[in-house]
Amino acid sequence: MTGWLIFGLCLALLAVGEYLFVVIGIATVLCVAFVQTGGVQTGIASDLFSAVDKEVLLAIPFFIVAGGLITRGQIAARLVELAKALLGWIPGGLALTAVLACMFFAAISGSSPVTLIAIGSMLYPSMIKEGYPERFNIGLLSTGGTLGIIIPPSIPMIVYAIMVGESLKGIDSEVEMTKLSVTNLFIAGVGPGLLLGGLLMVYAFLTCFRMNLPRMPFSLRSVGVALYRGIWALLLPVVILGGIYLGYFTATESAAAAVVYALFVELVFHRELKLRQVPDVLLEAAELMGQLFPILVLAYSFNLFLTFESVPEAAAEWLQGVVSSKVSFLILANLFLLVVGCLMDIMSAILIFAPLLAPMVAQYGIDPVHFGIIFIVNLEIGYLTPPMGINLFVASGLFKKPLIEVVKAVFPFIMLYLLGLALVTYFPWISLALVHAMGK
């Protein structure tokens, strides 16, 4: 009875717009004080310290700083210039350029809103000028921006690995499972990221083919010039991902290397970013971390309570009585996560629901890394679905269009992503083939 009262109180606080970290903090304190078996057996302060005493957490501020440096400098612009030189001669070449640029930038920034702002602000005016339909442009750029959370490095993947790792300890499975780690999630994200980007490019090509839009003549010289100007920008994802996949960097070390590399290239080679602008980038990163970390550490403490009380195991046992097969579980999980994505931002959804759902997958023989990718792809779609789709609000402000117009623009692309989600869900090798090939 006490648990239901606490749950009702939290729902009421969320309904009146209270901050998420306040709600989670109140839930944690009340549960530990009044619900936990045998009274208070863990210190919340100790839990909070354990939550931040993780080296991999340092990757988050480093990737945020790297994204800020890239956005203010020339790396993003030169990646777009290279993509345009490579694809501008194809029907719908500017649309294909937009998708490819989003994929490049996603492999640097790790953030969907940052990807949308960086690429959308550069390409949207050009696409309008070249005669591309306005609604198509908004839908394509808004959707392409979401690739930032599935193509590694990805900040949500880091948070997912941290929050789920604790709840998977001690859980046995009858089938061999891939170890859940940030590195393995990064590797597993490559296949689904390329799949979703490829679906966007195919759709863009087929849509633009019949429009008779202007095309750039192909020129090896233009490609050469763009490659020469963009070589330092192009090497950044190679440094980040190559270092991780070849075992030279951990996720945290690669994030730090990305900051050093981006700062060096922007200050020494591109020279568009001024040294006096760097403190502003650091300040913006600090503000974002100030919003994220209180939620993360309190959610970690709450998840320790859930694990101690065997809540995930009880939920899994109940679910097995209702859902008997792996396929049924995956269908139910996808439907549930699509609804969650409509109502919550991705970080909140990971912090609250990932530690509850992840322990259940072992009971159905589902690889935890595969399920992690399914979880992320579902919430990637949530970036495009009202009422909480963050890319919808970013696009509305960026393109100066009413929110309802943005929603209409992204609808065909949501259908495309649902197809991608189905493929990722029912063909695990899309996520796991590269992980297994690399012996991870």
Image (cartoon, grey):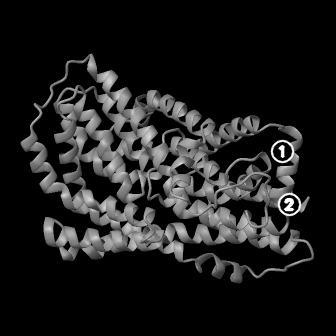
Q: Amino acid at mark 2?
A: Gly
Few, some or many C-alpha atoms within 10 Å of disc 1 (few <14, some 14-19, many ≥20)? few
Nearer to the camera, 13 or 291? 291
- Residue at 42% of width from left, 46% of height from top? 147
Q: Give the mark nearest the N terminus, 2 or 1.
A: 2
The answer to whether residue 346 is above or below residue 303 is above
- Residue at 70% of width from left, 35% of height from top? 331
Q: Amino acid at mark 1?
A: Leu
**Quadrant of residue 235 in the image?**
bottom left
Decide if residue 118 is on the left or right side of residue 43: left
SS state under label 1: helix
- Residue at 37% of width from left, 59% of height from top? 109
**Quadrant of residue 305 in the image?**
bottom right
Can residue 395 be seen at all in this image of the molecule? yes
Nearer to the camera, 173 or 211? 173
Marking on residue 116: none
Nearer to the camera, 407 or 410? 410
- Residue at 80% of width from left, 37% of height from top? 325
Which dot, 2 or 1, sits closer to the camera?
A: 1
Quarter of the C terminus within the rendering: bottom right
Few, some or many C-alpha atoms within 10 Å of disc 2 (few <14, some 14-19, many ≥20)? some
**Residue hosting label 2:** 3
Query: Residue most toward the left?
Result: 221
The answer to whether residue 419 is above or below residue 275 is above
Cα distance, mark 2 to mark 1? Answer: 20 Å
**Looking at the image, how many numbered discs can be counted on the residues?**
2
Can residue 74 be seen at all in this image of the molecule? no
**Residue hosting label 1:** 319
Decide if residue 118 is on the left or right side of residue 336: left
Residue 99, given in percent of the width and then of the height, sits at 33, 40
